[in-house]
Image (tube, rainbow, N blue to C red):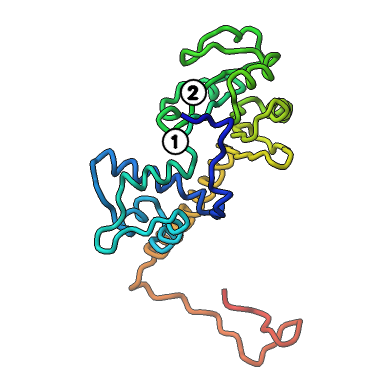
Amino acid sequence: MATGRTHRPATRSRGIPEATVARLPLYLRALTALSERSVPTVSSEELAAAAGVNSAKLRKDFSYLGSYGTRGVGYDVEYLVYQISRELGLTQDWPVAIVGIGNLGAALANYGGFASRGFRVAALIDADPAMAGTSVAGIAVQHTDDLDRIISDNGVSIGVITTPPGAAQQVCDRLVAAGVTSILNFAPTVLSVPDGVDVRKVDLSIELQILAFHEQRKAGEEAAAEGVALEDPDEEAPPMRATPANRKGPDGDMPAVMPA
């Protein structure tokens, strides 16, 4: 099996748009669920609905992969799983190092879904000397003093940062200096990286704030709807105070009293 350190995914060289790349994992998740249910084929409409996109966009995305399906039959599920996995680089072995083994780092280390998707947690690193040598998910935690050696020995090209925000940039700089070219950042801070290094940010607080916005808007809409529903359609509306058409306000053309 090829290792992630020496082989890079082919998506960029083939000119697949970043927006399409971002949707490929959504398709793969939906296809994997179909595969687990032994569904042999799927239409573009069914797969698009399962992935949460429209079918025209899905067909356009798949055209970049050279996959057009069969009219009247649809797409072969198993072949699409392989094709998308290959395009995303998931048929390779990607050693991953997690830096910052607090609650979140430990939870990620224990996540069983990495291995089935081509990612192998190769190293756990923490700055706390008391953590060194302890085992998390069957892997011994190592100290940040040895970060360069750890990255080199394990051929790591993907680093996951789960440190406090104040330490994230320093950890990022050390990972990049050690040869890491892709970083998944869980720390609530923006990282500065040189050209050629990819960073994906996962900020749970921002996602929760966005959800809070939508909850507030829904509550406002429900309150407005209830207000309309509580009005008695048989109740006579109070008379509106008339304003003579020729009455002018202090500013000239507008009436001094406007209806509410």
Look at 24% across and 46% down and name the residue there: 39
Q: Residue at x 56, y 43 (%)?
A: 209
Instruction: Identify the residue position indicated by label 1 in the image.
Output: 91
Which residue type does callout 2 highlight?
Ala
Residue 164, horizontal then vertical, whole percent? 66, 26
In the orientation shown, which residue stands out farthest toward the bottom? Answer: 246
Disc 2 vs disc 1: Cβ atoms closer than 8 Å?
no
Q: Nearer the viewer, residue 32 or 213?
A: 32
Give the residue drawn at x 61%, y 12%: 142
Label 2 or label 1, whichever comes before in sequence order = 1
Task: Name the quadrant containing residue 249.
Answer: bottom right
Q: Secondary structure at mark 2?
A: helix
Q: Secondary structure at mark 1?
A: loop
Residue projecting furthest to the right = 251
Q: Look at mark 2 in the image and give the residue it sits on.
A: 107
Residue sitting nearer the eye, 85 or 32: 85
Along the viewing direction, whichever of 217 and 238 lies nearer the viewer: 217
